[in-house]
Amino acid sequence: MKDYYRSKLVYLGSANVPYLKGVYFVNDYWDGSDFFVEEPDEKGNFTARIYVSEKVVSLFKKYKVQNIKFEKLSESTSMLRSIQIGKQYKLPPELRNMK
Protein backbone atom coordinates (compact mmCIF):
# COMPACT_ATOMS: atom_id res chain seq x y z
CA MET A 1 0.00 0.00 0.00
CA LYS A 2 1.37 3.41 -0.94
CA ASP A 3 2.08 6.07 1.65
CA TYR A 4 1.17 9.42 0.08
CA TYR A 5 1.97 11.27 3.32
CA ARG A 6 5.70 10.97 2.59
CA SER A 7 5.47 12.20 -1.02
CA LYS A 8 6.24 15.84 -1.79
CA LEU A 9 3.87 18.20 -3.55
CA VAL A 10 5.46 19.63 -6.72
CA TYR A 11 4.11 21.68 -9.63
CA LEU A 12 5.11 20.61 -13.14
CA GLY A 13 4.72 21.95 -16.64
CA SER A 14 3.80 25.38 -17.91
CA ALA A 15 0.34 25.04 -16.33
CA ASN A 16 1.86 24.34 -12.89
CA VAL A 17 -0.15 21.15 -12.45
CA PRO A 18 0.15 19.64 -8.93
CA TYR A 19 1.86 16.25 -8.69
CA LEU A 20 3.07 14.09 -5.83
CA LYS A 21 6.75 13.19 -6.12
CA GLY A 22 8.15 10.01 -4.61
CA VAL A 23 6.66 6.57 -4.14
CA TYR A 24 6.74 5.19 -0.61
CA PHE A 25 5.05 2.23 0.99
CA VAL A 26 3.16 2.06 4.27
CA ASN A 27 5.32 0.60 7.04
CA ASP A 28 8.05 -0.11 4.51
CA TYR A 29 5.72 -2.67 2.94
CA TRP A 30 8.32 -3.91 0.42
CA ASP A 31 9.82 -7.18 1.65
CA GLY A 32 13.23 -6.70 0.02
CA SER A 33 12.66 -9.12 -2.87
CA ASP A 34 14.13 -8.31 -6.29
CA PHE A 35 10.66 -8.17 -7.94
CA PHE A 36 7.68 -6.67 -6.17
CA VAL A 37 4.07 -5.77 -6.98
CA GLU A 38 1.55 -4.07 -4.78
CA GLU A 39 -1.35 -6.02 -3.34
CA PRO A 40 -4.67 -5.43 -5.07
CA ASP A 41 -6.86 -2.56 -3.89
CA GLU A 42 -10.15 -2.96 -2.06
CA LYS A 43 -11.88 -3.94 -5.33
CA GLY A 44 -9.24 -6.52 -6.27
CA ASN A 45 -7.58 -4.36 -8.94
CA PHE A 46 -3.80 -4.47 -9.47
CA THR A 47 -1.65 -1.65 -10.81
CA ALA A 48 0.49 -2.22 -13.89
CA ARG A 49 3.66 -1.26 -12.03
CA ILE A 50 6.34 -3.79 -11.22
CA TYR A 51 8.99 -2.65 -8.77
CA VAL A 52 12.51 -4.07 -8.94
CA SER A 53 15.67 -3.79 -6.89
CA GLU A 54 18.82 -1.97 -7.99
CA LYS A 55 20.34 -5.42 -8.52
CA VAL A 56 17.80 -6.14 -11.27
CA VAL A 57 18.41 -2.75 -12.90
CA SER A 58 22.18 -3.44 -12.90
CA LEU A 59 21.69 -6.86 -14.51
CA PHE A 60 19.44 -5.43 -17.22
CA LYS A 61 22.05 -2.79 -18.00
CA LYS A 62 24.89 -5.33 -17.92
CA TYR A 63 23.15 -7.58 -20.45
CA LYS A 64 21.89 -4.62 -22.48
CA VAL A 65 18.21 -5.50 -22.17
CA GLN A 66 16.23 -2.88 -24.08
CA ASN A 67 12.64 -1.67 -24.42
CA ILE A 68 12.20 -1.17 -20.71
CA LYS A 69 12.24 1.99 -18.63
CA PHE A 70 13.36 2.17 -15.01
CA GLU A 71 12.50 5.06 -12.75
CA LYS A 72 13.81 5.78 -9.26
CA LEU A 73 10.95 5.68 -6.80
CA SER A 74 12.14 8.91 -5.21
CA GLU A 75 11.80 10.64 -8.61
CA SER A 76 8.49 9.09 -9.67
CA THR A 77 5.53 11.48 -10.00
CA SER A 78 1.77 10.93 -9.86
CA MET A 79 -0.77 13.53 -10.87
CA LEU A 80 -2.49 14.73 -7.69
CA ARG A 81 -5.86 14.90 -9.43
CA SER A 82 -5.80 11.20 -10.33
CA ILE A 83 -5.17 10.27 -6.69
CA GLN A 84 -7.88 12.65 -5.48
CA ILE A 85 -10.38 10.90 -7.75
CA GLY A 86 -9.39 7.32 -6.93
CA LYS A 87 -7.89 7.32 -3.44
CA GLN A 88 -8.61 10.72 -1.91
CA TYR A 89 -9.01 9.22 1.57
CA LYS A 90 -5.33 8.16 1.53
CA LEU A 91 -4.03 11.69 1.00
CA PRO A 92 -3.08 14.08 3.80
CA PRO A 93 -6.19 16.17 4.70
CA GLU A 94 -4.74 19.40 3.26
CA LEU A 95 -4.43 17.80 -0.21
CA ARG A 96 -7.80 16.06 -0.43
CA ASN A 97 -9.79 18.92 -1.93
CA MET A 98 -6.96 20.92 -3.44
CA LYS A 99 -7.53 22.12 -7.03
Image (cartoon, rainbow, N blue to C red):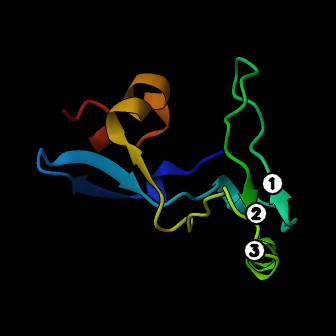
Residue type at numbered disc 3: Lys
Read off the residue under disc 1: 36
Tell whether label 2 touches label 1 (CB within 8 Å).
yes
- Drawn side of residue 50 relative to residue 74, left or right: right
Reading the image, the residue beneath label 3 is: 64
Nearest-to-viewer mark from 2 and 3: 3
Q: CA distance from mark 2 to mark 3?
A: 16 Å
Kind of residue sitting beneath label 2: Val
Choose top left, top right, bottom left or bottom right for residue 59.
bottom right
Q: Earlier in the sequence, mark 3 or mark 1?
A: 1
C-alpha gap between disc 3 and disc 1? 22 Å
Residue type for callout 1: Phe
Q: Separation of disc 1 and disc 2 at Cα?
A: 6 Å
Q: Residue at horizontal 21%, vertical 54%?
A: 11
Quadrant location of the C terminus in the rendered image = top left
Relative to the observer, which residue lies in front, 74 or 1? 74
The residue tagged 2 is 52
Q: Is residue 40 left or right of residue 78?
A: right
Marked residue nearer the N-terminal end (1 or 2): 1
Q: Which secondary structure lies at badge 3?
A: loop
From the viewer's side, name the closer residue of 42 and 16.
16
Residue 63 placement, left or right of 86? right
Question: Where in the figure is residue 83, as x and y percent of width and height?
Answer: 43, 34
Q: Earlier in the sequence, mark 2 or mark 3?
A: 2
Question: Where residue 62 sits in the image (x, y, percent)?
Answer: 79, 82
